[in-house]
Image: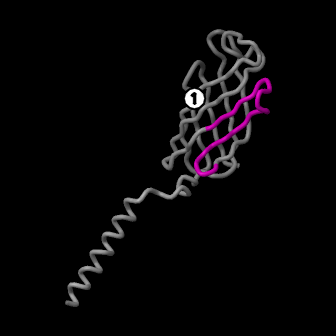
Amino acid sequence: MKSETIGRLILESLCGCVLLAAAPSPVGAAGSFDGNWQVVVECAASADGAKGYRWVFPATVRNGELVGVYNQPNRVPSGHLVGRIGQDGSAHLTMTGRTGDPAYTINRAPGGSPIRYSVTAHFSGDSGSGTRNEQRSCSLAFSRS
């Protein structure tokens, strides 16, 4: 009888361990990148003659969600960078905003024209890097501040 009780307790303990191991990670686990960050966006000159440019702005990560703002929304130029950073550091981000001086825009788009592009990025520790996926060559660098 006593060995049956011990066996049952061992089995219940093992089942509990298996359930804990299979349970999804708590939201806080995605928070390993939480905090204040600095973002640097550097876009090279494009083949159509648009000049290269550099934006530097702050971003905040909370529960794995990154939000960064260059200039005030709807100002010229402006940008709003958002997206989720996975537990493995991979991120897919989206930049929206408004263009500035036409000398810096593809096809000389007028100032105030909408901007929208995606970024593939990876974070590790206190830094990260990414690339713009559409239109022109841009790199992004992230550093925890």
Magenta stretch containing residue 69, yes or no?
yes
Identify the magenta region.
62-82
Identified at 21% across, 87% down, the residue is 3
9, above or below 124, in the image: below
Tell me which residue sits at (70%, 16%) in the image: 105
Q: How is the image coloured?
A: one colour
As drawn, is 84 to the left or to the right of 110? Answer: left
- Quadrant of residue 27 in the image? bottom right
Q: Is residue 144 above or below residue 92?
A: below
Q: Nearer the viewer, residue 142 or 73?
A: 73
Residue 134 x/y as whole percent: 56, 22
Outermost residue, bottom side:
2
Residue type of the residue flagged with mark 1: Ser
Determine the secondary structure under disc 1. Answer: strand
Asked whether, in this view, residue 12 is left or right of residue 94, the answer is: left
Looking at the picture, tell me which residue is in the foreground, 58 or 27.
Answer: 27
How many numbered callouts?
Answer: 1
Give the residue pinned by disc 1: 118
Coordinates of residue 36 in the picture (x, y in percent): 69, 49
Residue at 71%, 12% (x, y): give it.
Answer: 109
User: In the image, residue 15 lies at what x, y percent?
Assistant: 31, 69
Left or right position of 112 against 32: right
- Residue 95 magenta-drawn? no
Is 73 above or below relative to 134?
Answer: below
Label 1 CA crowd tier, 10 Å (few <14, some 14–19, many 20+): some
Q: Position of residue 127 (x, y in %)?
A: 61, 45
| Quadrant, the N terminus | bottom left
